[in-house]
Image (cartoon, helix red, strand yellow):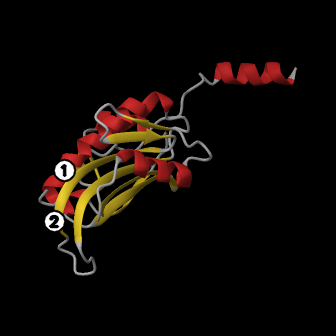
Amino acid sequence: MLSLAALLLTACSGGKKPEVEYPLPDTLCGAHVGKKTIEPLFPPGSKLTKTGDGLDKGKYASGCEYAVDNHKTLFVRNFFHEDVQTARQIAERRATMYGDGDKKVTVDASGDAAVYSRGAVAVEACAGYSSEEDVEGPHKSFSVEILTFYPKDLSKEEKALTQLVKKIVPIVAKANGC
């Protein structure tokens, strides 16, 4: 009888899906990517907050974080490396750190991008020196990394996530004179 009442309540309420009540950004940490590109990575909720720097500021390491209704949603970062890193190497480390026990990594055909259960990584060669005083030595490559907490199962979003991280790479490269 109780389950019948629950079923009737659901039917009467119209079974409304939770909605995204906040405006989606056109940029992701300063990188113009378009709303459609990032829409699957943002959950229903009423308030979106962003903290951190833009990826387009030419810093050795920068990025930002997004939260919906005070719940971590998306982290986007770039890092410069003193050696040439591969997307697989970085994704394997991130999968170990953030993958909730799932260490599977899928590398895209170019070899420059990889996805794991909680995110994606893309790499590019970029020789030079940082303009920041607290960073010593030359760098040879950089990575753009996305860590996402929504949706819980990223398997349907792997292709979109790979395209997104690869779309951000030229923006970071240009900002850093690569």
Give the residue at mark 2: 128
Q: State which quadrant residue 88 falls in.
A: top left
Residue situated in front as seen by the camera: 172 or 46: 172
Query: What's the amino acid at mark 1?
Result: Ile
Q: State which quadrant residue 60 falls in.
A: bottom left
Query: What's the amino acid at mark 2?
Result: Gly
Q: Secondary structure at mark 2?
A: strand
How many numbered discs sit on the rendered protein?
A: 2
Q: Secondary structure at mark 1?
A: helix
Q: Residue 121 vs residue 104: left or right?
A: left
Q: Residue 137 vs residue 89: left or right?
A: left
The quadrant of the image that shows the N terminus is: top right
- In the image, residue 69 sits, relative to residue 18, either above or below, namely below
Where residue 40 sits: x, y (%)?
A: 41, 34
Give the residue at mark 1: 171
Does residue 101 appear anywhere in the picture?
Answer: yes
Q: Mark 2, mark 1: which one is toward the viewer?
A: 2
Q: Residues within 10 Å of mark 1 (few under 14, many from 20)?
A: some
Choose the circle earlier in sequence order: 2 or 1: 2
The quadrant of the image that shows the C terminus is: bottom left
Where residue 146 sits: x, y (%)?
A: 39, 49
Q: Residue 67 vs residue 57: left or right?
A: right
Q: Residue 83 vs residue 156: left or right?
A: left
Q: State which quadrant residue 127 falls in.
A: bottom left
Find the distance from the CA under tag 2 to the CA under tag 1: 17 Å
Residue drawn at (51%, 56%) of the image: 70
Q: Residues within 10 Å of mark 2 (few under 14, many from 20)?
A: some
Residue drawn at (51%, 48%) of the image: 95
Residue located farthest toward the right when viewing the structure as drawn = 1
